[in-house]
Image (cartoon, rainbow, N blue to C red):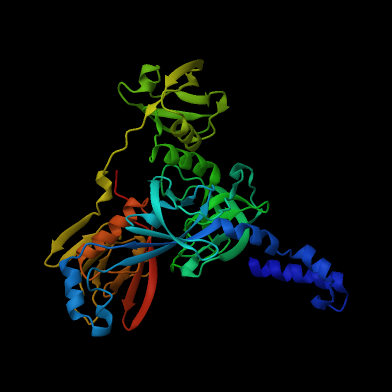
Amino acid sequence: MKRRVIICLAAVIAVWGGITGNVRAASPALQAAVMPSFADLIDSLMPSVVNISTITKPDSNNAEESIIDSAEPEFRRYFENGRKEEALGSGFIIDKEGYIITNAHVINDAEIINVTLWDDTLLEAKVVGKDPKTDIALIKINTDKELKPAVFGDSDKARVGDWILAIGNPFGLGGSVTAGIISAKSRDIESGQYDNFLQTDASINQGSSGGPMFNMAGEVIGINSVIFSTNGASMGIGFAIPINLADWVVGQLKQFGEIRRGWIGIKIQPNDGGKGVLVSDVTADAPAQKAGLTAGDVLLEVNGQEIENTKFFSTFIAETPVGNSIDIKVENAGKIRTAIVIVQELKEKTTPKTVSPDIRKTGENEYEISELGLKVMPATGKIPGLKVIAVAPQSEAETKGLKAGDIIVKIDKKDVPDIKAAEAVIYEAKIEHNRPVLLLLQTGEEMHFAALKLIKEKQ
């Protein structure tokens, strides 16, 4: 797509520059009009963007000790005295007090969070709060330096086809800018119930997470968070959290250090072929039941706003302050009524049962990893890993070409010498909205990558 655009633009310049087809014949003013520079805008935005690096000190285990014992001397220093893992990300300053927005997965389980400002000043940040459900975190630095906050835009007004700029810290390079357009809005990538992503073709890579997406007015309209990739690198499909959603989350984290979402105690589903949403279940003694809502009701409006879909209604309830009452226009059996519901606080479950990976021992040193659709056993070759001994039919693993005999060397760039190591990595992916994992595989003498979506537990 990009190649075609460049060819078309070059053709336009050539025609305007003269029949010779020489692009250089076009005037500088004409070239700037067709392919404008973002340089002046970027100069004004860079001071608001920060690079983030975190350090985590994982717990050691027997598998790790065996790796240390067998490692070559020049590699042992990476493991001795407790192996430290470093992660990279991005963020942006939102006020002069030093508050910074980033992704929750960037700072998850970090012992140390280092923030590098545009002028290379290195500061340590503290976590104010984080919300795994939306993958948003708020951190804070203390400094006497004059900080330049980013300006929030209105992500609802962004249109498909609008130019955007993404700034971040891909692969630790820092201060990298990519340009693209908004490819789609309101994307649901099944990472959580509040999915409402902006999709872009701007290049977003590892380390770009948490960085800002700017519109051409220099306003933040999104937080770059997720990429779709089969090999771990950018493939022209990236996703950003709309800033309108993030604004509410950040306000909660700043005020309470946590998220206090509204709750009325109903389950809803699309009303096929009709307006509004359909109530499929009502929790006993919940606010909805006390207001007279029952299964089979169709919810048409809330506080005078049309209920367009389940995502809209869920977000509306979540963002309604606890204790407030809402008016819901309800239809049932052709009759219209108004239900007045008092919103209560959603009590989060601390550890959902579905978080623990579903790994079962099926034989002597043989294990079935349900989330990957694979049966494995420890490899016995020179490279530590897990040997694939069976692939579930019609699974994504089979589609991606995995087969018996392949060796899984790493998952998400982490060594998996035994099943416990694999379980730990898959656990991290599950608590981060069941995000895909990246496998480094050895097939024969060749090494290659395969990205797999986690198979969700059957309800």
Q: Quadrant of the N terminus?
A: bottom right
278 sits to left or right of 402:
right
Quarter of the view holding residue 68: bottom left
Residue at the image point whose x is 36% and y is 20% from the top: 289
> Is any part of residue 75 visible from this angle?
yes
| Residue situated furthest front in the rendering | 144
Residue 147 at x, y percent in the picture:
55, 53
Residue sitting nearer the eye, 39 or 1: 39
Residue at the image point whose x is 23% and y is 82% from the top: 382
Residue 438 at x, y percent in the picture:
37, 65
Quarter of the view holding residue 446: bottom left
Residue sitting nearer the eye, 234 or 155: 155
> Is any part of residue 165 visible from this angle?
no
Residue sitting nearer the eye, 263 or 6: 263
In the displayed structure, 404 sits above or below 265; it is below
In the displayed structure, 268 sits above or below 290; it is below
| Residue situated furthest right in the rendering | 18
41 sits to left or right of 73:
right
- The mark tally for this picture is 0
89 sits to left or right of 427:
right
Residue at the image point whose x is 86% and y is 79% from the top: 20
Q: Quadrant of the C terminus?
A: top left
In the displayed structure, 372 sits above or below 296; it is below
| Residue situated furthest left in the rendering | 364
Residue at the image point whose x is 75% and y is 67% from the top: 9
Residue 423 at x, y percent in the picture:
24, 60
In the displayed structure, 346 sits above or below 228; it is above
Residue 57 at x, y percent in the picture:
27, 63
